[in-house]
Structures are given as C-alpha cells and as structure tokens.
Image: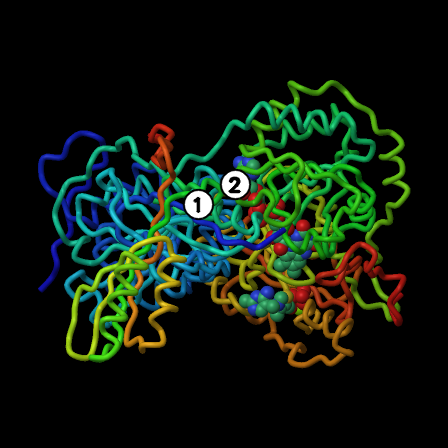
Amino acid sequence: MTVRSHTLVVLVEDKPGVMNRIVSLFRQRGFNIDSIAVGHSETPGLSRITLVAQGDDRKIEQLVKQLYKILEVIKISDVTDENPIQRELALIKVTATERNRSDIIRLVTDVYQARIVDATPDSLVIEVTGPPEKVDSLITMVRSYGIKEIARSGVIAMARGARVVAPTAQPVVA
Amino acid sequence: MAIETRERPRVSDEPQREPQLGAHLVLQALVREGVEVIFGYPGGAILPVYDALPYYPIHHVLVRHEQSAAFAADGYARATGKVGVCMATSGPGATNLVTGIANAMMDSIPIVAITGQVSQSVIGMDAFQETDITGITLPITKYNMVIRSVDEIGPAIQKAFYLARTGRPGPVLIDIPKDVQLAKGYLAPRQELHLPGYRPTIVPHRRQIRRAAELIRQAKRPLILAGHGIIISGATEELVRFAERTQIPVGLTLLGISGFPASHPLCLGMVGMHGHAHANRAIHEADLIIGIGMRFDDRVTGRPSEFAPNAKIIHIDIDPAEIGKVLKTEVPVVGDAREALRLLLEELEPLEHDDWISQIRSWYRPIRTEPSGPDGVLQPQYVIARLHALTEGKAIVTTDVGQHQMWTAQLYRCDIPKQWISSGGLGAMGFGVPSAMGAAIGRPEAEVWAVVGDGGVQMTLNEFATIVDEQLNVKVAIINNGYLGMVRQWQQLFHNRNYSETPISSPDYVLLGQAYRMPACRVTRPGEVDEAIQWARSFRGPALIEFVVNQEENVYPMIPSGGSFRDMIDDTQVEGEW
Ligand SMILES: Cc1cc2nc3c(=O)[nH]c(=O)nc-3n(C[C@H](O)[C@H](O)[C@H](O)COP(=O)(O)OP(=O)(O)OC[C@H]3O[C@@H](n4cnc5c(N)ncnc54)[C@H](O)[C@@H]3O)c2cc1C
Ligand SMILES: Cc1ncc(C[n+]2csc(CCOP(=O)(O)OP(=O)(O)O)c2C)c(N)n1
Ligand SMILES: [Mg+2]
C-alpha cells in the first residue's frame, strides 16, 4: 500500500486533557504527524482539529480507530480524497535591505497575494495564507533574502460544497 | 487539630438535607455502584476517605503493597465479572498501583482505582507525595480523571464504573485531591450520563453476519479461535451451540481458557506459542479462521505473515480497532460476542466437518505428564495433572507468569467460565498470589489455587499476611524449579545455555509459612503429591505447598517468538530431553 499524506478533521469535546490524550496516542503508537491545528468549531463545547499525517491506508485506518477510542473524540472524517479546501497561515520575518526591499514586496504582493504586516529598516514580516504548497513556495522564494523566523499555523481544512463534518449520531445516554 | 469527619452516613437517592464531606460522598457513591470490597492501603492524601470508611458496608482488605491491591481487584473482577476496586494514597501509593493498572488495561479487566491527591492549592508545586498519576496512567487506563470539586464526586464515580465495565472493559482511575475530600457538598442523584464520544457497538451489522455465515458455509476446514471476549460477554453457551451446530473445532487463547469447556469433544485446547501441536497445526491447515473476542496477540500468531496461510479471517470483536490491526480480515464483525453468535445461529443450519475433525484428532499428542524424569525427580507437569484430577477440574486457578503458567494452561483443563485467572498481555510476575486473594474474596465458596513459580511468588510473599488475616481459602502451590524457569528455557534454547542470572534461591517456604501462620508442607517425590494436595483440601483456609521439581524441565511444544508453525519445537526434537 502506498504511503501518502492524509488530512483528517477531528471533532473533540473541549475539555481539559484532550489534546494530551491525542498527542500521547500518536507518541505511544508511533504515528507521525506533519501538522496539527486546533480551534473552536461552530458548536459550543466542540473543538475542531485538523491533522495531517503520512501513512498507507491501513495505518491511517488504525489511527482513526485508535483516535475514536478516546472518549472525548466525537467525529473523525478523512477528507483527503475529497479535494478539500486547505489553508494555512504563516508569518515570515525576512531580512530586508534598502536595495532589495521593493523586490521582496513586489514578489510577495503581486505573485503570492500575500501582505507585508510589519516593516523595520532591516526586516519585513510577511503574512501569507493559502494551501500549504503556496506557503512552502513563498518560503522557498524568499529564502535567499535571509529568513529570520517562520511561524506556521498548521493546515485547516473544510470539504467543498454542502458536505459538512459534524457530529452525526444522536448522543448516547447511559 | 483533629479533622472532624465522623458523620452519620446516608446512602440513598433521596436528596440530602445537610451537606456532607466529600470523603463520605465518595464512599456513598461507591456503595451506590454496588461496591462491597475495596483492596487498598491508606496514606495522608486519602486519609479522609479512610476516616469515613468504617461507617459504610464495604469490606476493606488491607494488602501489603499497593501493586497487590490492583492485582487483587483484577482477580476479583475476573472471578466475579464485577468491577474490582483498589485504593491508594498519592505519590508512592499511586505509583505502586501502576503495574496492576497496566495489567488490567492489557487484559481488558474492569477495575476502578481510586487515588488520593495533594490539595489543589499545592498541585503543581512538587508538594510532598505529589505525583501526576493521571499523566502517568494516561496510556494504561481506559479513562482517568481528577475530581476537581465536591459536586463532581457522584457523576465522576458513576461514569468511572460505567466506562470500566461496558464496551471493551478496562481500568479507570479517579484521582481525588484532599481538599475535595474535605469540602462539603451533596451527592448528586444518579443521572443519565452524556457521553457523545462513547458508543460501543453491541449488536453487529446483519450484513456482516450474513457474509460471515456465507464464508462459514463454504469452508472445508474452518476453525474457531475463542478468546477472552467470550468470557467477558458471557457467551459460552452460545459458543457451545454454535460450535456444535456447525461442527467447527475450537482453539482457545491463553485468556480464552474456560470460555469453552476443555472436556468438549470439539475443544482443541490452547493455541499459540505454547499451544497444543494439533491446535496450531489446525490453524496452519485451516481455510477459515473465526476469531471471536480475541486480538490475535503475537503469542498467538507468531509471525503474522505466516499465520494461517491458507485461511480467510472472520473477526468478531467489540473493539473495531482490533479488527485489521494484525491480520487482513475478510469479514469484520464489530459487536458483542454473544450477540454476534446469536445472530450467526439464526443464519446457520447444521454443518458437518467430519474429515477435518478426524484429521485434527490424528495430529493429537498428549502433553507428557509422567510423574518423574530420568533421574526420578518430580516432574512439574505431573503436579498440575494431579491437581486437576484431585480438584475434579473445579477449582478457581490463578497463575503467576512463567513455565508453571504454561503447564497449568495446558493441563488444568477448565470447564467453567471465570475459573481461570492469568496475566496474559502484560505477563506480570507477582500476579498469582494477589489475584487469588481477589478471587477468594469475590467467590468465598470457591476453592482457589494459586499456581506460582519460585521467582514470581517471591515478588509478593508479603501477601501471605493478607491471606492469613482474611483467612482466605487460597492454596498456594509453589512450583520450585530453582530457576526463573521460562527465562532459563530461552537461555537454553536461544542463548547457548548461558544461564545468566536465572538461578534463584528461595527461603524455606515451610518455615516461612509458619512465620505467617499459614499451614505449609514440602513435596519432593511423586508419591507425596496426592497426599499433599488432599491435605490442603481437607480444611478451609490458607495453605501452602512447595513442590520441588525437575530444575531444567522445559515447556513444549514451543513456537519461538516471531516464528511460524513450521518452527515448532517439541520434546522429541531437543537434545538431552527424554
Ligand atoms: C509466558 C506467556 C506465554 C504466553 N503464551 C501464550 C500462548 O501460547 N498462547 C496464547 O494464546 N497466549 C499466550 N500468552 C498470552 C498472550 O500474551 C495474550 O495475553 C493472549 O493471547 C490474549 O488472549 P485474548 O486475545 O483472548 O484476550 P485479550 O487480550 O483480553 O483480548 C480480548 C479481546 O476480546 C475483545 N472483547 C472484549 N469484550 C468483548 C465482548 N463482549 N465481545 C466481543 N469481544 C470482546 C477485546 O476487544 C479484545 O480484542 C502468553 C502469555 C505469557 C505471559
Ligand atoms: C515483573 C516481571 N519481571 C520479569 C519478567 C520476565 N519473566 C518472565 S517469566 C520469568 C521467570 C519466572 O520464574 P518463576 O516465577 O520461577 O516461574 P517458572 O518459569 O520457573 O515456572 C521472568 C523473569 C516478568 N514476566 N515479569
Ligand atoms: Mg521457577
């Protein structure tokens, strides 16, 4: 089976210790995670995690099943094959000189539709959003100017069209 | 200043008028969950609960080490099917529970562990006896939690018991800071639990059942591998009916033992590393394996790629994550074993596999049980065979871990569910004696035999005191071979007989028995075996027998770790064996 990158959307109850359980599971079972991004979802009390992990289909299936065993995990959706909208935000601080400043600005704004959000005499901070490949590409392009710092948010994803990732089954009462 | 905790207890669902101490609410919640026994050990951070304990109808068993409290709770759970409870203080008390909790996790045993914790005002300050026990036990519990306020006590304990016993059972730990034990509040009535992320599938999909039935009908050489899930779900009766109707032979995992009667003509006994040769050969030749409530552990499969090379796999398990974990599975059936078997029985008409069954019978070779070896020394297998005969196979048998465990698995043929108690997945030495205590407390009418090695018993000798205090009907049979025998066997077979650190000395067990006021005797000759066993059975209460056996006896057959059926070694192949 072929190893490829999978994007999983995970809805979890927003309770103390949940991220710890999830991260501990990856460590314990030896799953490698490329990116993880967490934030609130449309439902109060539910957080939405977007995970990007490498693995063959069987390994990812195991990952999903093991994740489901965490009590606070409500729903997992593998959106990899649905061409989801994927976005990442990055802040990139680059060295800028009098001579190259305008080159950088032109590259960033014209080619990547990104923004300059801070400037000092010897640096610029670029803010870029887009698919992770776009962020990668921008980083490659500005590398030659000298990157001082990068902060990336991790990928978030959403299915196209009407499909939503939401808790489906009725909450079960014991 | 004395802390005043003496209040009249009240255990009912009526609303309470006066607020009560959290410590009392903890015990009231436990009583409400049906708890009758706690295995535990006190200390500062759990002291308020101990202060209130005498006022509740709970029998507290004072173990001599917290590890034994967890093992005893485990043995209690395995023998009764109920949730076992252990309790300890913070810090060292809590960390001493860890091995027992890990054992319960590996073997899906429902226990609830209650630990005291330092007060919330000092949590995170490296306070005296503060350890992050929920952090430590995160990967070895089904769930764990810290109770942060007195109002949470009732719901948290209700949730803990529900999670421990439902779905795939497992250990749940509840950490209770001391300030919560000392705060006043009310016990919330039992309520419906809202657990949106927890929905174990009990009734399997009809479609999968039909697909399974179809494969079963087509199979020429089908084989059932029945595991611990049969016992957990109480599916023995259904399994017997299913096997009889379909005429499919049944192999058992170590933890499946007692889930299908050993005396049943379709029973092949244990499979796997030290399983019977004919049972493993049946796996090798089978064209269909029906795994029920078992997780294809590596001690069962050996090298997975060579396991059952000709077979399709139907896997029935309550935990979807077990299906496809080890083997490619044709038909996954997620659900309770008993429900699945009921549905399968509805689908299937009687079948016949006479040729297949007689073929398997032709491979059968009994495990050797001669009384003595070449130089006249007592053989360990004989001891187990006699124990089985004299107790008519009806005792509850616990084991420690090692060679004696395997001989007992092979030779103590169990017919009654829950009579077999052994540490499988963790293989934790020191389990035999404390788990027998738990079994004896849970089943006071039963005769309980702890078959233990001279190595493992020395990890929990201290519990003889508990057995004697409680006058438990526990008979300890020490199989003394002077070695950490199982490890010595590996050294013999795979490390050139380099017996590095495996010879082990023992105290004089008869004197030790006397020191603990436990009737004890020693057996060195085959002729004394029956008499000693009968002596131990002639009275109720603790007894100890040391069987001094052949030191270098091995467990056969054996499929070396990571090997396949083709690599099986049996006693005819080993140089210098008889
Ligand atoms: C020295 C030593 C040697 C060993 N040698 C062997 C050997 O030769 N052969 C052998 O078999 N084992 C051997 N073992 C034990 C082995 O390591 C495993 O513990 C054992 O095989 C597990 O058996 P199991 O899968 O039936 O039980 P468990 O590990 O307890 O698994 C139970 C399974 O049943 C499922 N389940 C639980 N409840 C239900 C339900 N209600 N309905 C359906 N499914 C349910 C669970 O999800 C789980 O998948 C040995 C251990 C030691 C220490
Ligand atoms: C706590 C623990 N430590 C180490 C081991 C490794 N181990 C497995 S079997 C065994 C030997 C057990 O010796 P003994 O109790 O004398 O039993 P025997 O094999 O001789 O019957 C050892 C050391 C273990 N299973 N558990
Ligand atoms: Mg030994």
Question: Would the CB of label 2 be found within 8 Å of ligand 1?
Answer: yes
What residue is at 70 percent from the left and 56 percent from the top? B406
Q: Inspect the image, locate mark 1, and give the three-letter code of the amino acid beneath it.
A: Lys
What residue is at 24 percent from the left and 65 percent from the top? A126
Answer left or right for A61 relative to B289.
left
Depth check: give the residue in front, B223 or B435: B223
Tell me, yes or no, if residue B408 can be seen here.
Answer: no
Residue A58 position within the rendered picture, expressed as x and y whole percent measured from the top left: 58, 48
Answer left or right for B143 relative to B338.
left
What residue is at 65 percent from the left and 55 percent from the top? B298
Query: Circle 1: is it few (<14), some (14-19), or many (20+) Cα within 10 Å?
Result: some
Q: Label 2: chain?
A: B
Residue B214 position within the rendered picture, expressed as x and y whole percent measured from the top left: 71, 25
Depth check: give the residue in front, B468 or B161: B161
Q: Say the numbered circle drawn on residue B319.
A: 2
Q: Quadrant of ligand 2?
A: bottom right
Depicted B424 relative to depicted A81: above or below: below
Q: Inspect the image, locate mark 2, and give the three-letter code of the amino acid beneath it.
A: Asp
Question: Would the CB of label 1 be found within 8 Å of ligand 1?
Answer: no
Q: Quadrant of residue A24?
A: bottom left
Q: What residue does disc 1 label?
A: A69
Contact, mark 2 vs mark 1 (Cβ under 8 Å): yes
Same-chain check, marks 2 and 1 = no
What residue is at 35 percent from the left and 67 percent from the top? A139
Answer left or right for B29 relative to B287.
left
Q: Say the numbered circle drawn on residue B145.
A: none
